[in-house]
Image (cartoon, grey):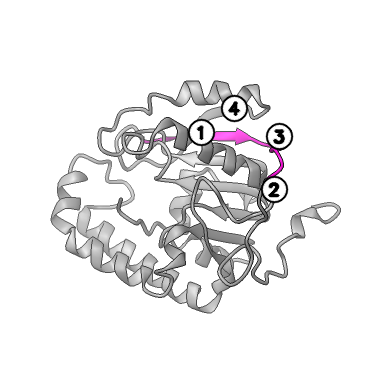
Amino acid sequence: MLVSARSFAEYRAMFTLGDRDLERRILDCPAGAASFVAEAGRRGIDAVAADRQYAEHREELGLLVERETAFKRERLAKETAGFVHTWYADADDMIRRWTANARTFRADIAARPERYVAGSLPRLPFADDSFDLVLSSHLLFSYGNRLDEDFHRAALLELARVARREVRIFPLVVYDTGAPYEGLAALREELARIGVPSRVERVAYEFQPGADEMLVLSTAGHRAPARTAPVRSGPGTAGAVDPVRWRHREPGA
């Protein structure tokens, strides 16, 4: 799986993020080396990134992404030859942009390490309703031919557990084939039965052909079952110092 480094502007388009959305507390999971949280911080937006890579490769992840994308240049050019070149002119342009985004990520994770939490789906180190809005891109459904239905079910339930209002997932097609994820309808039905309705929305972003929709889970009426184990705390986890962590629980928020 290629670790991505997409930008704040791409996130706004992929997830149809309006100004009101950006006033909420946001989780990006898995975030990879994206510059979304870094750029959000510059704008005063309350955003946190979570990724399993932060457990062992925090300091060098951005550099690893730079080197990996450059090393795989020929493969990326071949794989994206038939893609929609609205955001990227070609593979070289994509590599240049990802390199710049990865460098922004590197600077921010060094400056604000508490905003980058080591965590992996389907079990995240956050309390219930820790975030108003959860964003998840290019893992669920994208790797639907590698990650089974049980993983997808557990991951969706976990994202719903930590989201007080909504979960948005993009895209809904398998990366290797470009085909829609076959199990989506069944998973949506299961979620609806436990109080998590969902809808599919078209977005103003398309790179892989046909990958222009997101899944939105409405979690306001959902209460997850109690956990059997405590949430971890400590450096690099959800228990790290974060003075605005519970801002969304204040009256009027």
Q: Is residue 224 magenta?
A: yes
* Residue 102 x/y as whole percent: 37, 67
User: Sequence order check: which comes first, mark 4 or mark 2?
Assistant: 2
Q: Residue at x 59, y 71 (%)?
A: 114
User: Sequence order check: which comes first, mark 3 or mark 1?
Assistant: 1
* Residue 30 x/y as whole percent: 47, 53
Q: Quick one: 21 or 174, which is closer to the camera?
A: 174
Asked if the residues shown at circle 4 and circle 1 are in contact, with their CB atoms under 8 angstroms apart, the answer is no
Q: Rate crowding at label 3 as few (under 14), some (14 to 19) or many (20 or more) other CA atoms within 10 Å.
A: some
Query: What is the span of residues highlighted in magenta in the rendered image?
Result: 211-227
What label does residue 191 carry, if any?
4
What label does residue 128 carry, if any?
2
- Locate residue 182: give its quadrant: top left
In whole angstroms, how far apart are the C-alphas of marks 3 and 1?
15 Å
Secondary structure under the numbered disc 4 in the rendered image: helix
Of marks 3 and 1, the one in the foreground: 1
Asked if the residues shown at circle 2 and circle 3 are in contact, with their CB atoms under 8 angstroms apart, the answer is no
Secondary structure under the numbered disc 1 in the rendered image: helix
What label does residue 57 carry, if any?
none
Q: Rate crowding at label 1 as few (under 14), some (14 to 19) or many (20 or more) other CA atoms within 10 Å.
A: some
User: Sequence order check: which comes first, mark 2 or mark 1?
Assistant: 2
Q: Rate crowding at label 4 as few (under 14), some (14 to 19) or many (20 or more) other CA atoms within 10 Å.
A: many
Which residue is labeled 1 in the image? 153
User: Sequence order check: which comes first, mark 2 or mark 3?
Assistant: 2
Q: Is residue 66 left or right of residue 44?
A: left
Q: Quick one: 130 or 42, which is closer to the camera?
A: 130
Secondary structure under the numbered disc 3 in the rendered image: loop
Check disc 1 and give the amino acid type. Answer: Arg
* Residue 183 x/y as whole percent: 42, 25
Considering only vertical position in the picture, is 106 above or below 174? below
Q: Quick one: 5 or 130, which is closer to the camera?
A: 130
Which residue is labeled 3 in the image? 222
